[in-house]
Image (spheres, coloured by chain):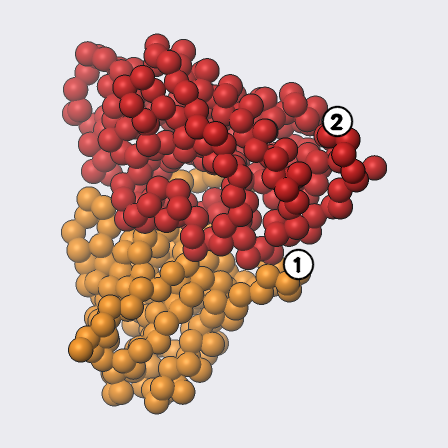
Amino acid sequence: MSGKIAVGISDYKTSKSPDTLVTYALGSCVGIFLYDPASRIGGLSHIMLPSSSLRTNDAADNRMKYADTAISDMLASMESLGAGRDFIHAKIAGGANMFGKMDGSFIDTIGDRNVDAVRQELARLGIPLIAEDVGANYGRTVHFNLKDGSVEIQSIGKEKREL
Amino acid sequence: MFGSGVQQMIHTYGDLSDMHLDILSEIGNIGAGNAATSLAILLGERVDITVPSVRLLEYKDVISSTLGDPEELGVAILINYTGDIRGVVLFLLGYEDARGITDILTDGMEDNTDNYGGSGLSEMKLSAIKEIGNILGSSYLGSLSTLTNLHVNISVPYMAIDMVGAIMGPPMLEFSIDNKNIMLIEESFMTSRGSLKSHVILFADIPSLNRIMKELGLFI
């Protein structure tokens, strides 16, 4: 039985073939799709913000919200399911700037900052980034198929793409 | 002004007391009332507002509890405010309602020849929507400023037409940094033709909420 598992904002889920991991309406958030083709174990992380250093209090900690904490946690979760670290690659999508240029606003370029933070974290972890669909000014819904690691992206008024 | 007991400063949205929430609800009521008056003048019809709701929601629940399906097509106009207090006002409309409003405003003036990102709305209609958002946001924040005697600067309006989930993400995330929950003050408008699927949502950061409460006499 293949299941469809939804991943919300500031969340990640790991599973294996034949499941599909889905996340809806990525705007400035970034979806990270890690996949081990050997074991067909994968993980989808939906991060909201680039760095946990933005926090000023720890009371509301959620490591799944930030690029610099979510990806390494998800990687550990995949390894505990049996994924081989050396085989894992990454694809990413999202990081749009939904409202265009916004002078002086925190939101201005947040999509770009999220994408940069994700790339840096993947590099730090030594995970190759093999495909991406990022930036621009539109939302993305993503289906990540763990049978083959393919990533299908839908946006309003645009053709479906596959990574 | 609200003289029944000294209230504590808040550190997270979760600290907001019932009295705080009542006050914020009243602020939303007055702000949205002003915005509705502006909208009624623009549209030339009566506009009513729902009772405002002040809600503390986990950010993952904000989208599903405002417009529903995160993939639904929506139109948003966002205004940043800064000065003594800071935050975001978001005017969110269902796509068909946005079309309906612009049909009234641009009646018989042109057809849909242009197209913005496949939105099916012309340049003129897009400008009209943006201007409505601007007027509503300004009326809302103007009344907030008057009520609290605080100085508020507002940004130019920014617009996005896309999946509601993708549009709501960016304004939420700034306020989610130190918080599990997000506070939003929300109202819906109704015109004589029926309910307009619309929301005015006010986000404010924690220092701003404390400042508002202080100006209204809650802290001594």
Residue drawn 62% across and 59% down?
A: A55
> Residue placed farthest to the right in the image?
B220
Q: Is residue B54 left or right of residue B124?
A: right
Is residue A142 left or right of B152 when viewed as pictured? left
Q: Amino acid at mark 1?
A: Thr
Q: Secondary structure at mark 2?
A: loop
In the rendering, at what x and y percent does residue B35 appear?
47, 21
Report x, y in % for residue B94.
30, 34
Nearer to us in this view, A58 or A135: A58
Q: Is residue B157 visible?
A: no
In the picture of the structure, the residue carrying the numbered disc 1 is A56
Q: Amino acid at mark 2?
A: Met
> Which tint was used for chain A?
orange
Label 1 packing within 10 angstroms: few (<14), some (14-19), many (20+): few
Image quadrant containing the C terminus of chain B? top right
Q: Find disc 2 in the rendering and name its residue.
A: B1
Residue A99: x and y, percent?
Answer: 40, 40
Secondary element at image label 1: loop
Q: Is residue A127 above or below residue B64?
A: below
Of all chains in the rendering, the one displayed in red is B
Residue B20 horizontal side relative to residue B164, left or right: right
Parent chain of label 1: A
Identified at 38% across, 82% down, the residue is A78
